[in-house]
Each structure stands twice: as C-alpha cells, then as structure tokens.
Image (cartoon, rainbow, N blue to C red):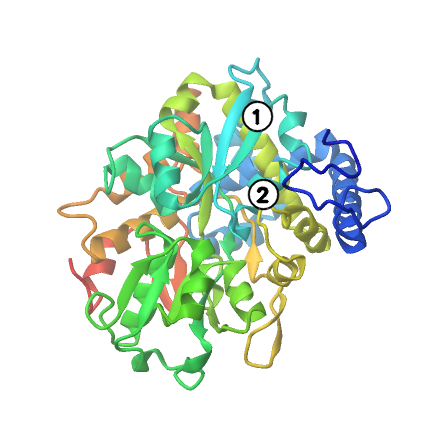
Amino acid sequence: MSDLRHDPYDADRPLLMRCACGRHGSEAEHARELDRDRASATLRQRADVMDTADIEAESNQFVEAALVKALFPQDALRRRFLRAVGRGSAMAAISSVLPIAPLQAMAQERGALEKKDLKIGFIPITCATPLIMAHPLGFYAKQGLNVEVVKTAGWALIRDKMINREYDATHFLSPMPLAISLGLGATATPMNVATIQNTNGQAITLAMKHKDKRDPKSWKGFKFAVPFEYSMHNFLLRYYVAEAGLDPDRDIQIRVVPPPEMVANLRAGNIDGFLGPDPFNQRAVFEEVGFIHILSKELWNGHPCCAFGTSTEFIQKNPNTFAALYRAVLTSAAMAREARNRELIAKVIAPQAYLNQPETVIAQVLTGKFADGLGNVKVVPDRADFDPIPWQSMAVWMLTQMKRWGYLKGDVNYKQIAEKVFLLTDAKKQMKALDQAVPDGAYPKFNVMGKTFDPAQPDAYVAGFAIKRA
C-alpha cells in the first residue's frame, strides 16, 4: 500500500500528494529530496576518487603524525629539527628508530570481521558529522559493515546504552569515556576514544534581551544550559566565567539540558543562554531568539568536543571490526575537513533521520559563513572542523577541569588515565605490541584563553586557578 500515490490509510502521508512523482507533500519537498540525492551522489563520487590508496595514505599520515608527535611533543622542537636536517633526512632518521612502516601496515590490515551488524548511537548535532555521513554515503558498507546509526535523546542515555551493551560504538562527548572509565556518575566501565569527531564547533549563545550584557562580569544570576556535566561545554563555560571573576557554582546556575531542547528553553525564558553544540547556536539565531556571543574556538582554537568511541571490551573482542569502523569514520573525517564538501554534507545530514534541521542552518555552521544574530554576517571557515587525532594532552586538560571543579577527588594519575582511554595516539601501546622501544610523548601544549597549558604540570595548573573547588 505504501507504493500507492494516494493511500487513504497511511497516517504519515497527506491524502493528495502535491508533486509530480506522487510521493511528496509538495514540489518543494520533492525538489529537496532530489537535491539531497544529487549531493550524496557527488560526495560518493569524490570518495571514490580518493580511492583506497588515498584512504590508506590518510591512515598512514595519521599513524606517522602520532609517532612524530610522540618524539617531538613540543611543536617548536619539531620545527627546529626539520629546519636543521631537512624533510628527507628527518624522515629517514625517524624511520630508523620508530617502526612506522609496520604500524602503518597494521593500520591497513583487514582481517575477517568478527561482527558485521552494529548499532551506533548519536546525538543530532553537527559534531557527529563524520559518524553520521558515513551512513548515507556508504562508508560503513564499503568496509563490510551493516551499521544502524541510532538517533538518541540525550547523553545520559548514550552512556547507559553503552554500559548495557545496547550500542556497539557511539558518538561521545570527549570527556565521557574518561568519566565512565573512572566510574564518575555511572558504574565504572572501561571505555576508549577512537577518534575525535570534531574540533571547535560550539558557541555561547545568549537570549536577545541580553544584547547589552556582553561582558561576562555582568552575568551574575544568569541561568545557563550545557548538554552534560562531563562535557567540554561545561568545562569551557566554567573556565570562561571564572576568568571573568565569577564562580560558576555560586554566581550563575548551570543546568543540564539536552541539545535539541536548548532553543525552546531560551525562547521560554527558562535560561539566559547556553554553551552548546551546533546547529543549535545557529538555530537560535534562525529563530530570532538568541545571538552568538562568542565561538568556542575563540576560547581554545582547535579544542576537542565530541569523539567516536567504544568499550575496551568491544575492541578486545572485535579488533578487525573496530579497525573497519576506524577506517570508515576516518574517511568521513577526511572528506568533512575539505571546505568544498561542506555545503553538500549539509544537504546529506539535514533530513529527519539525522539532524532534522533546516539545511541553511547546518550550512552556515559547516561553511563558517553565518549570521550572528546581531546584524552581522561572519566568515569563520574553521568555526567547525574535523581533526580526528585525540592527543592525550587533551584528555589531561579535561581531567584537570574535573579535578578543579570537584568531580575528581584525591590524587589523579593524569597520564595513566589519558593513555588508557585516548587510544589512537597511544603510539606506545602499538609499539609495545611490536616489542619496540617506547618514546615518551604525544602531549602537545595548548593555549586556552591566552594561557599555555602544559600537560606535564597538571597539578600546578589546577593549583594556579583562583576560583576552584579542589
């Protein structure tokens, strides 16, 4: 019956279809679906042009970058070394002491899949772009996987379904695998970060009535929403207001609100603002209920937000399946990083099954050309980006903020936890498996609001904050 043009017994379709093919409620809806189909076809063609060699090259570069970072955790030292000896000599020297070729071969090894039918959870936000787009573009299928991507209502549900093994892998907030592994807010269950899904891509959005309160010092008494306690959103919001002299636990209120409910709460006046994921910052502008106060990249350019991960148990039981998932998501990330693909990706992930948002809202986020709600059109190409490397110093920073605000008590072995949970830059683990000498590292420094974070001095970093619970 569902193939009939006019089915009086289908509650999900209007009685009279209003397009030429008889399957859509209007010609506009018909045109949108054709447009999405064309976008998907173009992206698939571009992925095919990348071909296996290019995908392998991407994976090889990923492995080599991780190893070089391990040798030269400080970028300035790496640059001085390269200038002194030259690219060719540097590659030969590094290859002589690190097992780059064997590790690259291991990354490409394709053993029999232990499990083909998988469920992967996601929250409908642009952070999950690589994980989501791998589905309609067939990247999972190309790896021999039958993946169901499951839209999920909130982060607590994501956590519970991973702990209960209802999902095989998932879209995580980057701090969540750390928290779950440590038993914070849930039963301790070892989890791993496979790749970072996105960098940047968040913002502080304020209600329109606060146009004249751009200075965070004036926010005393404000109510803010974040998507989850163990989120970069919570940690960055706390950091930002504390730098302005406000205590985030005493001078403002921070509430956990699922991302899809943030705009409605802003409209209703239940919150004054939110530090949340896109597309909801841009959706608030689109709905004319809020304006973008500051992009998260202005707080920490290149900061991680969401991650793709799974349980340690899943990886141990299904190493080949895990590697296939890694290849699919890494391919997606490579495509998402290319500016020319962003508008097409917006079309592909806009429908109800994925983000369920106006295409123009998603396109503004992904292309970085957007209205800010204050009458300006901004051009910020890296407003959202998709660098997949989960540097362990990122994990250490998250742990320092958990310590700072009292989520973590007592002594913390930052390095041990980071290396156990953040997997793919753990070059040491892979090298140990090959009985090779293990270099120290994979801990680059970052600048957060103008201050350098040294992952080698986490306790001193926490102690240096004037406002803290620790």
Number of residues whose C-alpha sits closer than 10 Å to that of mark 1, classed few (under 14), some (14–19) or many (20 or more):
many
Q: Is residue 105 visible?
A: yes
- Residue extending furthest front? 8
Amino acid beneath label 1 = Ala
Cα gap from disc 2 to disc 1, whole angstroms: 14 Å
Give the image location of residue 274, x and y in percent.
40, 65
Which label's residue is closer to the chain start, 2 or 1? 2
| Residue 449 appearing in the image | no
Residue 454: x, y in percent? 33, 56
Q: Amino acid at mark 2?
A: Pro
Q: Which mark is residue 324?
A: 1
Residue at 41% from the left image edge and 69% from the top image edge: 268
Q: Which residue is mark 2?
A: 130
Task: Give the total number of marks visible in the rendering.
Answer: 2
Relative vertical location of residue 312 with respect to residue 362 in this rendering, above or below: above
Of 131 and 242, nearer the camera is 131
Q: Residue at x 74, y 32 (%)?
A: 51
